[in-house]
Image: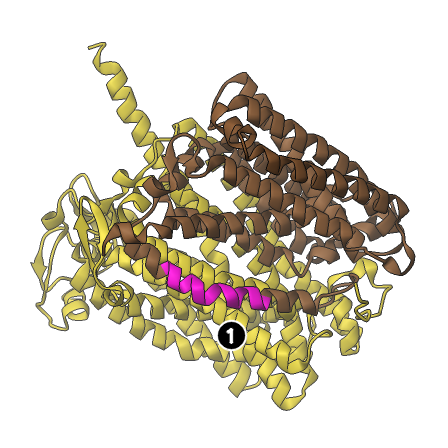
Chain colours: A brown, B yellow
């Protein structure tokens, strides 16, 4: 097999991998955000709110988390060298993130099955696990963006990124709750969404400035002529969404729940644009400044085998994912089984 | 002298790192495998319960289903989160593995995620929470699809594991494995035996778990027909499958004898090649002296089992000097597996006779059944150690040693992550086992109140039992 004719394979796989990471960030992002936002107090009203919040993600979190397995799996399969460089550089935050995900995943099940006096503890574990996972993911993203630089400035940037990603997840989680709940909890969720939206906006601006000032190549990619003109509509779109979401959320609850999906849809657009921005900044590198996707790719023959599998299987996966969401469509109710 | 010191230290550090990585991976995989081992078969058993209910409309079958589906969910959650850890570890701790055999391991792992993971995770929610939201037929189909997913997952993982034991269908180009035949990779020499052995192990593990928890409920005074249905079904299942497992295990052993003679030599404790080798019931293998102490043996039996001839030749460990696994752990694990297996055989036959034929539930036998609740776990882990430690010093037999695949990460970082994992695993294992019995206790109390089936659904959430509405009509968004 002539490898030059199969040069499109690494590009397809980086697109698939990127898509998986994006879908993960949106879907498990709202699960993790809901977890981080759980109220901690033992008051009965808070217990009811926690139950409702966890029910709202109950039927989905498991499949949502699978996108992370797919994303990391695709990186392992298609770009094994990058997988080992990136994950070895991020060894400890990875281990800590996994700890958070384990804690979150098991708490969800234990909280309903353990003796009821332990339920509150499992709820706290759920919150702690979600928070650890989001902070670690943000920190890892910051480390990655700065090409694993170990300077103090880079570390501070990674910490900033940890907070921003957590704010972003809180926003998408709160937007999810605005969509899935009603009454008091919906009002509370709207407040959470307002605050996390502001922090996320600050975070995005900070990350953009930092990123453009760190790397001249990336700065040139964005600020050079004529691409700089694309920035103008982008900034306007961001500004429009930020303002309208804030105005909308201040009015919740709205009669007939008109447009309750709007903040969530904006979250999807914001996440997608940020993600595309990152991808544009780094392409064709998979390990920043070190390794391109073409250097890191596995043998074309093996990639082709997975490619045909993915062509057949992915539409089926998307099909039954939509089916599962349709089954649990609408406002959250108690989960019985 | 001084100039050598850093070198020696580096060597030591890398050895420590290798050791820690191995312990960590062994801990990860040992912990992880406990949960799929239950669930691969438990899901098909749930399909059976659901099918019985659909056929008979007997409430008791639905009660059994509802009780066990919740245990399935808990087991699944722990299996998923511990499994995610594995997919990260390949890169962090065993970078050499994917670099050398990634062209084979990659697609197999990829197919596992694509064909199995999403299927399980997506339909699990419908299986768990969808009973009031979809038709009974769709719910049953969802249960079947989850079962298909767990089995597919087991299939791909065992294909990969078998390939690592008995690699086939590839060629090495510049030190990297390239596939020549996917058919040979998938249907490598040990795959059918290993898959069969593992699936049966799963069925037996699930059967003993169901039997143990059901016997516990009976002992606590829960004499409902649903508990007896589950107990009788599980002991009969075990009684039927146990001899089958012995048969498949024997075939598996013969296959190992053909393809991995060093492993068999370690299992049997044969140091020098010999004809008419005895079967060692007990011994203390001594790696330093390259001999066994305190042998208790049956003459010629090992040769008879492995070659079907009284004086058949078994190749000894000395033929593989420097390339054979550590003998003691393989030797002892093998005996532990066989011992527990025999106990499970005796127990399942006795229990089937008493419970189903005689319709008697003597307390001592119920207690013995409870004691055997997790026997499947012990046997499976012991068997797993035989096969995995038995492959050492190779990660992929004859292709890649474990040492070559190891990471360059600082040992102290691995020590840190290992400590974290061990604490979490220890805690979760205790919490899991405790919770199973808490759930059993709760079911006993609930059944004693003689509830209608609808009230059973509240069993999971006693603190919010006030809301009896099962579903709110899905309001348009």
- A103 or A286: nearer the viewer: A286
Element at badge 1? helix
Residue appearing at x 61%, y 43% in the figure: A273
In the rendered image, the vertical position of residue B360 relative to residue A93, given as above or below: below
- A85 or B158: nearer the viewer: A85
Residue appearing at x 52%, y 51% in the figure: A20
Which quadrant of the figure contains the C terminus of chain B? bottom right
- The residue sitting at the front extreme is A226
Tell me where the magenta segment starts and ends, as one range.
A306-320
- The residue sitting at the bottom extreme is B56
Whether residue A55 is visible here, answered yes or no, is: yes
In the rendered image, the vertical position of residue B29 relative to residue B112, given as above or below: above
- A334 or B426: nearer the viewer: A334
Image coordinates of residue A245 in percent, x first then y, are: 79, 44
Badge 1 density bin: few <14, some 14–19, many ≥20, Cα 10 Å: many
- The residue sitting at the top extreme is B2
Residue B108 lies in what quarter of the image?
A: bottom left
Residue appearing at x 29%, y 20% in the figure: B9
Residue appearing at x 42%, y 37% in the figure: A285
Task: Report in which chain the residue with disc 1 lies.
Answer: B
Which quadrant of the figure contains the N terminus of chain B? top left
Image coordinates of residue B257 in percent, x first then y, are: 18, 63
Report if residue A318 lies within the magenta region: yes
In the rendered image, the vertical position of residue A31 relative to residue A36, given as above or below: below
- A220 or B431: nearer the viewer: A220
Tell me if A31 is positioned left or right of B412 in this view.
right
Return the residue at label 1: B44
């Amino acid at each position: 097999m002539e490898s030059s004719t199969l040069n499109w394979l690494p590009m397809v796989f980086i697109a698939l991998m990127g898509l998986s990471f994006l879908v993960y960030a949106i879907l498990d992002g709202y699960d993790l955000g809901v977890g981080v936002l759980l109220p901690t107090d033992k008051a009965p009203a808070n217990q009811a709110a926690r139950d409702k919040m966890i029910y709202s993600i109950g039927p989905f979190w498991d499949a949502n988390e699978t996108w992370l397995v797919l994303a990391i799996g695709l990186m392992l399969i298609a770009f094994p060298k990058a997988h080992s460089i990136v994950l070895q550089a991020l060894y400890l935050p990875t281990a800590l993130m996994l700890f958070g995900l384990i804690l979150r995943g098991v708490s969800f099940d234990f909280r309903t099955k353990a003796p009821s006096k332990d339920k509150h503890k499992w709820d706290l574990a759920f919150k702690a696990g979600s928070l650890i996972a989001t902070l670690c993911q943000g920190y890892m993203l910051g480390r990655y963006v700065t090409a694993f630089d170990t300077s103090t400035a880079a570390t501070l940037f990674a910490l900033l990124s940890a907070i921003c990603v957590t704010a972003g997840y809180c926003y998408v989680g709160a937007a999810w709750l605005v969509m899935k709940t009603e009454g008091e909890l919906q009002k509370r969720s709207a407040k959470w969404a307002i605050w996390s939206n502001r922090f996320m906006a600050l975070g995005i601006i900070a990350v953009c400035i930092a990123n453009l000032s760190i790397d001249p190549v990336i700065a040139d990619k964005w600020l050079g002529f004529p691409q700089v003109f694309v920035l103008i509509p982008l900034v306007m779109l961001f500004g429009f969404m930020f303002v309208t979401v804030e105005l909308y959320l201040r009015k919740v609850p709205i009669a007939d729940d008109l447009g309750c999906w709007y903040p969530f849809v904006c979250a999807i657009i914001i996440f997608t644009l940020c993600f595309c921005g990152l991808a544009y900044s780094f392409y064709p590198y998979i390990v920043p400044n070190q390794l391109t996707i073409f250097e890191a790719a596995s043998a074309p023959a093996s990639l082709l085998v997975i490619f045909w599998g993915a062509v057949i299987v992915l539409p089926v996966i998307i099909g039954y994912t939509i089916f599962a969401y349709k089954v649990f469509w609408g406002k959250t109710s108690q989960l019985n089984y | 002298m001084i100039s050598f010191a850093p070198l020696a230290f580096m060597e030591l550090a890398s050895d420590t790192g290798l050791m820690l990585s191995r312990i960590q991976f062994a801990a990860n995989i040992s912990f992880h495998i406990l949960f799929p081992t239950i669930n691969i078969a438990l899901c098909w058993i749930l399909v059976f319960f659901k099918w019985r209910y659909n056929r008979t409309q007997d409430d008791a079958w639905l009660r059994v289903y509802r009780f066990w589906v919740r245990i399935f969910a808990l087991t699944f959650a722990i299996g998923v989160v511990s499994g995610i850890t594995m997919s990260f570890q390949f890169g962090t701790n065993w970078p050499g593995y994917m670099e050398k055999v990634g062209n084979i391991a990659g697609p197999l792992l990829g197919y596992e995620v694509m064909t199995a993971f999403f299927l399980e995770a997506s339909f699990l929610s419908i299986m768990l929470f969808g009973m009031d939201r979809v038709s009974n037929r769709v719910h049953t189909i969802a249960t079947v699809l989850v079962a298909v997913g767990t089995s597919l997952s087991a299939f791909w993982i065992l294909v990969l594991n078998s390939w690592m034991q008995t690699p086939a269908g590839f060629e090495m180009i510049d030190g990297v494995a390239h596939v020549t035949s996917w058919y040979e990779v998938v249907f490598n020499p040990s795959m059918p035996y290993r898959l069969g052995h593992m699936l049966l192990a799963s069925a037996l593990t699930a059967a003993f778990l169901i039997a143990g928890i059901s016997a516990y409920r009976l002992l606590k005074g829960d004499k409902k027909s649903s508990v007896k249905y589950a107990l009788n079904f599980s002991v009969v299942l075990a009684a039927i499958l146990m001899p089958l497992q012995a048969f498949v295990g024997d075939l598996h052993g013969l296959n190992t004898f053909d393809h991995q003679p060093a492993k068999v030599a370690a299992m049997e404790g044969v140091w020098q090649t010999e004809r008419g080798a005895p079967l060692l019931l007990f011994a203390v293998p001594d790696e330093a002296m390259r001999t066994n102490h305190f042998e208790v043996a049956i003459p010629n039996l090992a040769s008879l089992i492995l070659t079907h001839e009284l004086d058949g030749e078994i190749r000894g460990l000395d033929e593989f000097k420097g390339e054979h696994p550590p003998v003691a752990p393989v030797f002892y694990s093998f005996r532990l597996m066989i011992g527990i297996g025999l106990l499970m055989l005796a127990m399942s036959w006795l229990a089937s006779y008493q419970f189903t034929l005689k319709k008697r539930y003597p307390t001592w036998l119920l207690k013995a059944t409870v004691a055997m609740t997790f026997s499947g776990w012990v046997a499976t882990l012991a068997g797993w150690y035989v096969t995995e430690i038995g492959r050492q010093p190779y990660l992929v037999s004859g292709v890649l040693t474990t040492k070559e695949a190891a990471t360059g990460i600082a040992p102290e970082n691995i020590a840190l992550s290992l400590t974290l994992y061990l604490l979490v695993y220890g805690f979760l294992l205790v919490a899991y086992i405790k919770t199973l019995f808490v759930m059993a206790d709760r079911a006993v109390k609930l059944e004693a109140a003689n509830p209608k089936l609808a009230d059973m659904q509240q069993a999971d959430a006693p603190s919010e039992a006030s809301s009896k509405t099962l579903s709110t009509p899905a309001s348009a968004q």
